[in-house]
Amino acid sequence: MTGSKGHWMTTAARLGWLLLAAAVFSAGTAVAQSQSPDPIVVGAVISVSGRDSAFGEECLAGLRMAVGESNAEGGIGGRLISLEVYDDRSDPILAAEGVRVLMKQYHPLAIVGSNTSMVTSAAAVAAQNLGVPLVVPEATNPAITSIGDCIYRVCFVDPDMANALATFSYQNLGVRKVAIFMEENHDYTISLTRYFSRRFKELGGEIVLQLGYNPGQTLFNDALDRVRERKADAILVSGFYPEAAAILEGAKAKNLDAVFLGGDAWEADQFFAIAGDAVTDKSRIFVASHFSPDMQRVKVKGFVSMFEDQYKRRPNTSSALGYDAMGVVLDAIAAASSPTQIGVKAALLDVRHEGVTGRIAIDSSRSTSKKVIIMKAMPEKRFAFVRAVSATTDTTMQVSRP
């Protein structure tokens, strides 16, 4: 009996200590939770793999850098930012699925994505259906924000880019006859071609040839022969960097001397790897884009320095637009009347964000207007700043220094 009684007392003592420990643990957990509340979740549907991965990887680097900066400063209201990423693999169907998955698993206050217009459009439809704000970093087709009032954009649109490129080529390069090579059946390329042609004709220029090509095409011999026959002094490649580089290679092999023009989809390091020695110090290759690391604004210089320190490479347009898109989202979360998707959606309309790609103010179409950056492809395998021009359709263009 004594041994039995002694065993009972030991058990009671142990139970008491367990209850005391549980109370202390519970109090400690409450304190910890009050000090470290749940993070604020922001989603990202990004083309980390697939055809558009050159843009997606850089965009994601910019997103992560912006989140890292915010968290280093304590987050928003003492809550850190958690970035949840879904790889849409450059596929519109998966982009829509990514929005649905993020909403089901993480309930983000907003989502950023995707990278190209066709993929982003699918993500936008899903976001609108679910009522979550989608902030578009770099898809320029103007129809995307018309999908609904949950869709916002931090970059300029195709008409802005096309107007600036057409006016620059006509007024500054003396181009009068343009041949257009356009990737078929892509929202971005169709839109860029339409607006460039309209503006170039308004200025007095002539579109002497327009040809379609398929993604992945590498041979353009017959098309380049037709360019020579039509005496075009410039070729607009309304498409993406792999085919643009292949066209440059073909033109070099044929000794075809022409100005080459492109949009922001040329801007990838892989462009130079494919083009090889087709880019020389005598080349006249110009692209219209959103950002140049050569620009001397204080904010740009700081961003470039931090990006190079973190990633050991220079940022490009996709990096900068990802960084700015997240900056806009975080500003809206901080300003929202409530930490909800509805609150963030309302706050996005009033955001005024000084970004590295320019001042971002969401307009009535839920897009933004900024100057267009003209850059030249250099044999050192980089795009160099030429000038920043207004996207206005006026014939007098505003010019700024880097």
Image (cartoon, rainbow, N blue to C red):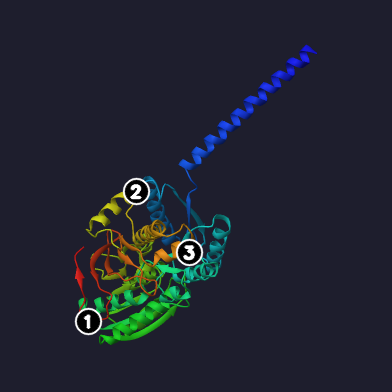
Q: Disc 3 marks which residue?
A: 342
Name the residue: 41% across, 61% down. Answer: 55
Name the residue: 53% across, 37% down. Answer: 29
Give the left or right position of residue 183, taking residue 92 as reference: left
Q: Disc 1 marks which residue?
A: 395
Quadrant where the N terminus is found in the figure: top right
In the displayed structure, 272 sits above or below 163; it is: above
Identity of the amino acid at label 1? Thr
Quadrant where the C terminus is found in the figure: bottom left
Residue 261 rendering spot, x and y as whole percentages:
31, 74
Name the residue: 63% across, 29% down. Answer: 19
Q: Disc 2 marks which residue?
A: 312
Identity of the amino acid at label 2? Lys
Task: Name the mark nearer the viewer: 3 or 2.
Answer: 3
Q: CA distance from mark 1 to mark 3?
A: 42 Å
| Res 247 visible | yes
Task: Name the mark nearer the viewer: 1 or 2.
Answer: 1
Which of 346 and 368 lies nearest the eye of the viewer?
346
